[in-house]
Image (tube, helix red, strand yellow):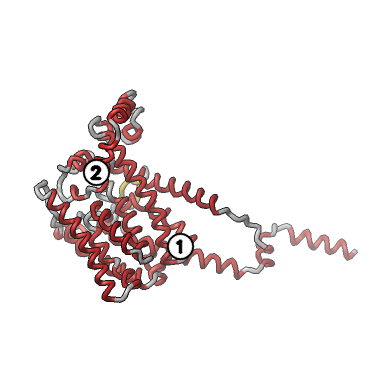
Amino acid sequence: MSNRSILHRFRGWLLLVFIYYLAAAASFGGFILKWQLSENTPYTLPMMLDGVAERPFVYRQLLPTTANELGKLIPERAQAAFLKKLAEDPPVSNPIHRYFPNASDSANPHYALRYFIVYALTFLSMFAAMFLLRAVCIELLHDRVAATLTPLVIALILPLIQTEGGYFYDMPELMFMALGMWLAARGQMIRLALVTLVATLNKESYLLFVMSLAPFIMMRYPLKRAATVTGGLLVLAGAVNWVIKHKYAFNSGSVMEYQLMSHVEYLVNPRNYLRMEMNYGVLTTKGFHVLNVLLAILVFKTGWRSLPKTARYHAWIAAVLTVPLFIAFCYRDELRNLSLMWMTFSLVICATISTALSEASGRDRKESPVKIAERDRPASAPRAEAVAATQSSL
């Protein structure tokens, strides 16, 4: 008979929200400590807010545009009071600049309010992404315990993936990918269309992610209708892409940077698989470090077969789209550019956790209550029982 107490649904959700909040805070803190919001680069947050950053970075306009519009809605008196408060006792009065001194743009009066808005929205995106990742894992793998643990792992790993750069649109990207997959798996195509519009404004690569959602759409509809729905989503994403690229066509930079040769040279150098870096204030493996590669192989080997066919088809499409583009156009060792594979990685981790929990549960069931009692009994117990038996016989 189990002596475990039952956790009330409300208390369970309250506990989950608290734990996820702390995990999201740790992940976001690791990111902001490492990269801030792109200070001292040709695509700083003020440049993104003003729309003068280099391409392709300037295309990621969701949070900057949102901050600009919210800034217009806040009364001037409230903005003046906010800026006065920040300037009272710097840097103590500015919590961002106090704890992250390199985040210098947060102390610029012209951008401070909008900086705080983007800062908050980035964190909230990570916080929301954890619940959406859990929902996707429950929907596809049906293991609530493993699904609840998986976002904790992803949150902690995210700053390690941001090896050569980290950006405020990375966390909304993860959130929108999880939301898109969840909606596609549940057949909610109208909502998916709305998400596609917003998510593509956050990052233009969402168009490719929509293509990888085709297996989930095909699961819900006949082939002809599924092709029509997928094509419609691609048209929406393409339209947003065209508008944004047309608007910033005269910015410096380019749509994509060709880096095939330098990337190949990096990948064939054995020393690059032993690189280290600082994360969370301690030394960790970096990028394609051999240990990271081995752990990824182990996780995929354990969890891949447990994925439903739709998730595996999604993974193959995402890999076919991502890997060539990553090698040809992305900076060396920048794992965040493999973002189309994030959902696959999350599902494989969930499947691996589920397998480990099932094996542990199976081992526990094999032990009878008598064996468990014998295992947990103190060493002196048998001797005491023998003595008692002898005395009774006398």
| Near-viewer residue (66 or 135) | 66
Residue extending furthest right?
Answer: 394
Q: Is residue 330 left or right of residue 173?
A: left
Residue 108 falls in which quadrant of the image? top left
Report crowding for label 2: few under 14, some 14 to 19, many 20 or more residues within 10 A (C-alpha).
many
Q: Is residue 54 above or below residue 200?
A: above
Q: Quadrant of the C terminus?
A: bottom right
Kindly identify the residue that appears in the image at 22 percent across and 49 percent down: 60
What x and y, as percent, mark residue 8? 57, 53
Q: Residue at x 34, y 61 (%)?
A: 343
Q: Nearer the viewer, residue 332 or 2?
A: 2
**Above or below 113: residue 248:** below
Front residue of 87/241: it is: 241
Q: In the rendered image of this protein, does residue 28 appear above or below residue 209? A: above
The residue lying furthest to the bottom in this view is: 223
Where is residue 38 drawn, in percent x and y? 24, 42
Local SS, label 1:
helix
Residue 64 got which mark?
2
> In this orientation, does residue 96 appear?
yes
Q: Earlier in the sequence, mark 1 or mark 2?
A: 2
Q: In the rendered image, which quarter is residue 41 located in?
A: top left
Asked whether residue 333 appears in the rendered view, the answer is: no
Q: Is residue 90 above or below residue 215?
A: above
Viewer-proximal residue, 375 or 113? 113
Q: Residue 319's x, y, as percent? A: 27, 66
Q: Are marks 1 and 2 in contact (CB under 8 Å)?
A: no
* Mark 1: amino acid: Ile
Q: Measure the alpha-carbon separation of dots 1 and 2.
A: 37 Å
**Amino acid at the residue labelled 2:** Pro
Which mark, by number, is residue 353?
1
Q: Secondary structure at mark 2?
A: helix
